[in-house]
Image (cartoon, rainbow, N blue to C red):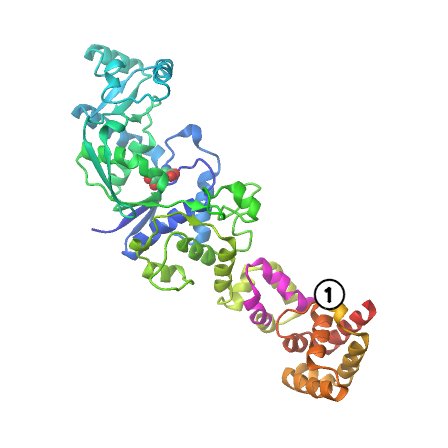
Amino acid sequence: MRERARFAPSPTGPLHIGGVRTALFNYLIAKKNGGDFILRIEDTDSKRTVKGAEEHIQDSLRWLGLKFDEGPIKQSERKYLYKKCIDELIKKGLAYYAFDTSVELEKMRANANGQFKYNYETRKNMINSFTVSDEEVKSRVKSGGYVVRMVVPEERKVTVNDEIRGSLSFKSNELEDKIIMKSDGMPTYHFANVVDDHDMKITSVVRGEEWLSSLPSHITLYDHFGWNPPKFFHLPLILKSTGQGKLSKRDADEQGHPVFAVQWEESKGFKEFGYTPEGIINYLALLGWKGKDETEKYTLDELIECFESKYINKSGARFDVKKALWINHLHLKDFSSKKILSLSNQAKSLLEKKYEVKVCEEIVDLIKQRLNTVLDVEKEVFVFINQPKSYDSDAIEKITRNTIYDILNFCKLNTELISDPLSLKESLMSFASESQISFGNIMKTLRLCIVGSLSGPDLFKIIEIIGHDETLQRIESLINKI
Ligand code: GLU
């Protein structure tokens, strides 16, 4: 059978990183088996639909490169199908009309101290197809204002299988006769979800573990229709960095990282924070899944190849922003310079104003290893554009004015060496021993002049690229500062 997996978000808000991971795992399961990935928008609850949420979901998937083969299929446009299936269950006696008003239901709940369940027992005392005459059912249905509930049989053992957690059993008496059609004629999530998974020939359902408790009701519906259920994978939660509790937007704000793939209203997403889709996909794959070996870096194609659902974890995965940055770094450092420049327009236009395209790419090659995010590109290329804005004050303490003068004189006298990093290094070494200054000291001083701090890319390469005049100017600038 052709593998078909679907991502089925409700457009009740922006797409959170947990939802992105669900989409990714669905995608991987589908593609691993050469199958289809489908986007279904579960929008049957119009009251909870948030404007712009569906676009946010699609923008996020687009940025991440998770292309769907079918969709978006909107449930709100498939009412006819749900109605047909509801009628079928009513006809079989496996669903029924319920006419209780919200006031009556409230009263029952209050009497039962909040323990009230509409089920095989209590339905006998309520107003529904079982307790009123056929005539009355007809006339009440005509005047509207009813819901349809599913029949959950008494004293049955419902066994459900989750591919991650194994087989679980529930007593049907603990379940409720869930509403499957609301008074506005729309199906509820549970009903539309089951009908659609069957209708769309879905073979694997991957979703968050919060849906595990609904699975017995879903399986009951599959039984009612006589349909074979798909395979279910309930993914563990993404936990906050402390490991206690589900990661929320507030926790993420506190830790200084986003929770959306792309910007939502005022809140920046991973994209705007300078993460790459490759980095985020890779990091999210490792949140709850681990390959056979210690490999950490995977492209999407490599994930498709290596992904095995049996290695999905049962327990929650802690969101670790340092690891996310590290994984992002692993991807950035392997990108071509051209690609990196295409991701950072700012850096590209700054560099291209000053250098030829070939040199711009050479510069990016020099800084690649130092990038954690795309935003770092602009920061890192600065040294090739301008004099340092400031100098590391601790480092200034360690150098002497005399040494800077010596270096300045050396550079003035050795103009031709500036464009030859190897000879410059050698000559500086002999200059160091002649003038009895340690080579380390000379390097530190020169680096401070050129970069403003003691770290940064290969110093001789920087000097080669910025050229003789700029090098002298930077040395003189530091002399003027101390
Ligand atoms: N609409 C549900 C959600 O947003 C989908 C659950 C499922 O995938 O079955 O989480």
Q: Position of residue 461 (x, y in %)?
A: 63, 76
Q: Position of residue 239 (x, y in %)?
A: 45, 46
Above or below, comparing residue 208 to residue 466 in the picture: above
Q: Amino acid at mark 1?
A: Asp
At 23% across and 14% down in the image, what residue appears?
A: 137
Residue bearing the label numbered 1: 394
Residue in the foreground of this view, choosing between 102 and 192: 102
Asked if the stretch drawn in magenta spans residue 471, the answer is no
The residues colored magenta run 363-392
Q: Is residue 209 left or right of residue 369?
A: left
Residue 166 showing in the rendered view: yes
Q: Position of residue 430 (x, y in %)?
A: 70, 88
Residue in the foreground of this view, choosing between 168 and 405: 168
Q: Position of residue 365 (x, y in %)?
A: 56, 71
Q: Main structural element of the magenta stretch: helix, strand or loop?
A: helix
Residue in the foreground of this view, choosing between 397 and 452: 397
Quarter of the view holding residue 120: top left
Quarter of the view holding residue 285: bottom left
Task: Locate ligand 1 by image quadrant.
Answer: top left
Asked if the stretch drawn in magenta spans residue 367, the answer is yes
Quarter of the view holding residue 200: top left
Q: Is residue 338 left or right of residue 170?
A: right
Above or below, comparing residue 16 to residue 120 in the picture: below
